[in-house]
Image (cartoon, rainbow, N blue to C red):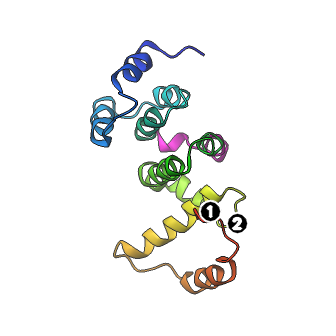
Amino acid sequence: MKPSSQAEQILGQIDHDNVKLGDLRTIAKAIKKDHTLALELWASGQFFPRQLSILLMDPKLLTQEVINKLIDDIEKHPEDQKLQLIDWLLANQFSKDKKTIVLMQNWRENKSSLLRRTFWYHQGRLRWVGQTPPGNTEELLQGIEQGIETEAPEV
């Protein structure tokens, strides 16, 4: 599928070797939410367009099927980029919608180490943002003790 002229223009704006995250945020702020454009930028397969794409996505349109496809694509990136992309998805999309928060709560045993990372990261965030911790802290600590030796390092 050929990218739209808007996607081509944005891809041309991004200096792929030296992009500042603030520049991506400025572009995203001007565009606002545009899920179709986000998917076009994501389809480029390039790291910085994918970061911008994350900022443009509509969290209400992120189903488990769509998320699984995003994860498959992220897995093709080098390790440092993978972790940055998944952490951006959590911070900028997954934590923004009740539906995706519910999905995250089911990723503790997911086959994808990146989704498991997201589960644990989200659980940590619930405890450090000054709210009353959820009631499952003891269960989670037991899970950590039982699985930490065999868990993937990125989790």
Give the quadrant of residue 126.
bottom left
Residue in the foreground of this view, choosing between 101 and 54: 54
Q: Is residue 113 above or below residue 63?
A: below
Tell me: 23 left or right of 105.
left
Q: Earlier in the sequence, mark 1 or mark 2?
A: 2
Verify whether residue 123 appears in magenta: no
Residue carrying label 2: 109
In the rendered image, residue 70, in percent from the top left (x then y), is placed at: 60, 41
Q: Quadrant of the N terminus?
A: top right
Q: Is residue 126 above or below residue 59?
A: below
Q: Amino acid at mark 1?
A: Arg
Q: Magenta region: which residues? A: 57-69
- Element at label 2: loop
Tell me: 41 left or right of 110.
left
Give the quadrant of residue 106.
bottom right
Verify whether residue 59 appears in magenta: yes
In the rendered image, residue 144, in percent from the top left (x then y), is placed at: 62, 79
- Element at label 1: helix
Residue in the foreground of this view, choosing between 107 and 42: 42
Q: How many marks?
A: 2
- Circles 1 and 2, Cβ within 8 Å, touching? The answer is yes
Rate crowding at label 2 as few (under 14), some (14 to 19) or many (20 or more) other CA atoms within 10 Å. few
Magenta stretch, overall SS: helix
Residue carrying label 1: 116
Residue at image location 55% in from the left, 60% down from the top: 118
Q: Amino acid at mark 2?
A: Glu
Q: Is residue 19 above or below residue 124?
A: above
Rate crowding at label 1 as few (under 14), some (14 to 19) or many (20 or more) other CA atoms within 10 Å. many
Residue in the foreground of this view, choosing between 75 and 3: 75
Tell me: 145 left or right of 10.
right
Residue at image location 53% in from the left, 58% down from the top: 101
